[in-house]
Amino acid sequence: MVLKKGFYWGNSVSSMQTEGAWNEGGKGKSVYDIREASEFASDWTVATDSYHRYKEDFDFMEDLGMNMYRFQISWSRVNPGGDGEFNEEGIAFYNQFIDDLIERGIEPMICLYHFDMPLNLAEKYNGFLSREVTDAFARYGIEMVKRFGHKVKHWITFNEQNVYHMETQAFQPAGYLTGNKTLDELYQIQHNVMIAHAYVANYIHEETDCQISGMLAYQEVYPATSHPKDVFVARQADEFLNNNLLEVFVYGRYLDSFWTFVENEGIDLKLQEGDLDVLSKVRSDYLTFSYYQSLVIDHRNIPEDTPPNGFLEQGQVDNEYLEASEWNWQIDPLGFRNVLNKIYSRYHLPVFPIENGIGVIEEWDGKNPIQDDYRIEYLKDHLQAMKDAVELDGVDVMGYLGWGMIDILSSQGDMRKRYGVVYVNRENHDLKDLKRVPKKSYDWLKKVIESNAENID
């Protein structure tokens, strides 16, 4: 058997992309609740209505043989203003939610934050630009561990935490509403988020028997050519967007290149007394990441004064050797194997891909299962790459969680972009009946999980 006994198979989601019930159960508003619908985006009021229908979704996961579900607690559901008094009705919802998972033999993994800043904290403090929000997150996160840590043993703080290090992507998920989005503010946000992670991670290791990981949207970056400058910018992107975070998650320190850049640019991180001591205590029990595609970078497209945090956004080009999805996400199973190897060989902790999949525009005829052979091919190729990493390269992989294996709203609110092996019958502006309908890939995935990936054909 290639994969270890007890290998985790499962599904990952966020709360705002699934739950709906935006004004029920004492929930406060998040920044998503005020976003308006557009041509290719729904509002966030219903999502896939998992607040009311999650047991049906759990039944599908149990039938598939899944033994882990990574979900997110909505900060504003359990703490309507983001700080202060907790909402016991919201906590009771997740308490039952967790029990219903465990009853089906599905182990919960909790993510504490997936871009949905409580609106009050965004408006009052400009989100994670403020240390008040860092402290509020720590109080929220530690309270959730106190409430659920006796039965939830796997935790992550921030979904894809390196998003807060990306020049043009960091601000919206940080709850930043006003300002000029300066380099100083970018670095302030990423430091504040890392301190928030540290507070919760250190509490977990000092006070509980739970396990925690930092999580990345791993940026697998290839140089466009063998030109030394292409190789250099690809390496720097890797260093600033991947390894600088992994160094903290594993060893409790930022890289020397990070500190040198901060000093040379005159960036004020507004370090508080004790920050570096708090960071120095951070450890991870394993390392989690999302992987969908690899990227290519061309130095010629990058303006001279661009910080490494912006190299990808300025220099990304298409890879002529790879096919791409409808969203131009380039399909690269070998890149997945590369990432598994790079993380494990550098840090020698178990690695755990907790998001992977392909988003495709799909329509259901109301009668026949969707014939999603393209999804089967994508998942099969990536699972084979993972098996090769284990069997041929010696990587310790502890599980595999697909993203949105029951269809959910995309991160931009677009219901056209579907990742699931179960179809949810709604469109962006027509909720229809929200019926759950297995696709062709459902039966294939069930056989894969039953065989612990011995049979992926």
Image (cartoon, helix red, strand yellow):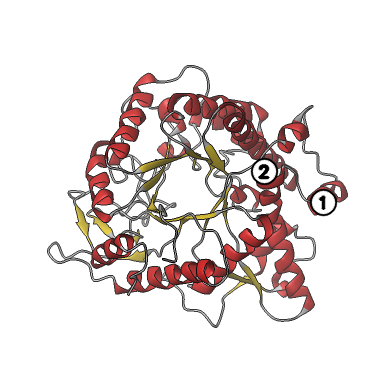
Q: Is residue 283 left or right of residue 289?
A: right
Give the image location of residue 276, x and y in percent: 77, 35
Give the image location of residue 118, x and y in percent: 49, 31
Cα separation between marks 1 and 2: 16 Å
* Numbered mark located on residue 278 in the image: none
Q: Work out which residue is located at the far top of the displayed protein and give it.
A: 85
* Numbered mark located on residue 256 in the image: 1
Q: Is residue 184 above or below residue 453?
A: above
Q: Quadrant of residue 375?
A: bottom left
Label 1 crowd bin: few (<14), some (14–19), many (20+), radius 10 Å: few
Q: Residue at x 44, y 66 (%)?
A: 2
Q: Which is more toward the observer, 269 or 246?
A: 246
Label 2 crowd bin: few (<14), some (14–19), many (20+), radius 10 Å: many
Q: Amino acid at mark 1?
A: Asp
Q: Residue at x 32, y 52 (%)?
A: 66
Give the image location of residue 36, x and y in percent: 40, 44
Q: Secondary structure at mark 2?
A: helix
Instruction: Specify whether residue 294 is in view.
Output: no
Give the image location of residue 392, x and y in percent: 54, 72
Q: Amino acid at mark 2?
A: Gln
Closer to the eye: label 1 or 2:
1
Q: Quadrant of residue 102?
A: top left
Q: Secondary structure at mark 1?
A: helix
First in sequence, mark 1 or 2: give its number.
2
Q: Which is more toward the observer, 4 or 300?
A: 4
Q: Residue at x 70, y 40 (%)?
A: 191
Q: Is residue 413 left or right of residue 122?
A: left
* Numbered mark located on residue 190 in the image: 2
Q: Is residue 147 left or right of residue 136?
A: left
